[in-house]
Amino acid sequence: MVKFYPSLNESHVEFITNQSLFYVASAPWAGDHINISPKGHPSRTFSILSPKTVAYLDATGCGCETISHIYENGRATIMFSSSGPKPQILRLFCKGRVVEKWDPHYQQLRAKMATENGDEVDITGARAIIVLRIQKVQTSCGFAVPSDGMGDAVAMAEHEPDSDGAHSSKAQDTLENWARKQLEKQELADYQKQMNHRSLDGLPGMMSARRSHDENFAVEDAKAWFRKVSRQQDAVAFGVGLGILFMIALSLGGVLSIKPLFIEHILNFQRRQMGIPEDHSWDKREL
């Protein structure tokens, strides 16, 4: 049975701390992609800061969907799930913010996460901390997930050939090894500049990557806003129509006097064609 809670309780915290994997879902206001990302090692990357606030370390990867989406609209859903004799699914519906590694609050927040966790919070190649304010907690049974489903998925992932460490579907420590090598070669920043600059839908990505491109934030953010609005044509059309109806209502109520200029020009043109004197009684100052 589905149950909703306004915040985390002790049973939720216990369930979360016993899981070895969680998922993050996010999406733009308007676009072609909805993103779901698996995250490993929650004992070292995920912290419960309060019953209404959680945070996790975000490792460098081949995309920046979650970061781009949270920068744009803040929406994110975290999911933990378990299988076996007592399967369960727990979702956190959240509004988030991004704290990138260059931010002066990053180290302070990371230290707070470590204190709350009771363990060292760190992951090689971390690029940001995603802080999430919980709006709603949902729990439900996990009977739709086979008891051996997770085992089969892990087995398939472990045997999937992939020579590129950054795109490997193996365990999370493979990503850490890759990040460590990039740091040793001093190439991690270049990788972020190349791969974390834009989302799949063209949204602005990591601010550090954008700075590396010498990007004009005001111009690019304005472009992103216009792209978002242009993809919501039904909402724009509804807003324009509602504005027109509102002006008509005010005009009928005598609150506003509306005499469109183009209509006067059309009527005067017809009068000239018919040899009738033009009507100049309309005072433009009434607008």
Image (spheres, rainbow, N blue to C red):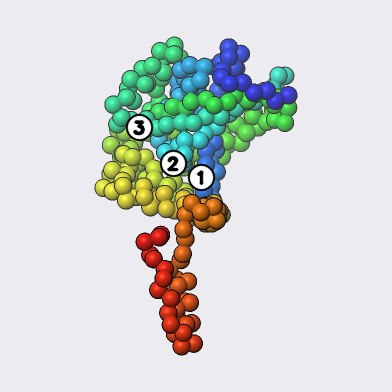
Instruction: Kindly indicate the quadrant of the structure image that contains residue 98.
Output: top left
Sooner in the amino-acid sequence: mark 3 or mark 1: 1
Measuring 55% from the left and 23% from the top, which residue is drawn there?
20
Residue 170 placement (x, y as % from top left)? 52, 34
Which x, y percent locates residue 225? Answer: 41, 49
Query: Callout 1: helix, strand or loop?
Result: loop
Q: Which mark is residue 167?
A: none
The one of 173 and 266 positioned closer to us in this rendering: 266
Q: CA distance from mark 3 to mark 2?
A: 15 Å
The residue indicated by pointer 1 is: 29
Give the residue number, with chain letter if any, for mark 3.
Answer: 100
| Vertical side of 265 occupied by 108: above or below | above
SS of the residue under disc 3: strand
- Residue at the location (38% across, 16% down)? 112
Crowd rating for badge 2 (residues with CA inside 10 Å; few <14, some 14–19, many 20+) = many
Number of the front mark, 3 or 2: 2
Categorize mark 3 by other alpha carbons within 10 Å: few (<14), some (14-19), many (20+).
many
Q: Residue 163, how many percent across, how many down?
A: 46, 42
List the residue tagged with mark 2.
Answer: 72
Determine the CA span between mark 1 and mark 2.
Answer: 8 Å
267 with respect to 107 (left or right): right
How many numbered dots are placed on residues in this image?
A: 3
Q: Callout 1 environment at 10 Å: few (<14), some (14 to 19), or many (20+)?
A: some
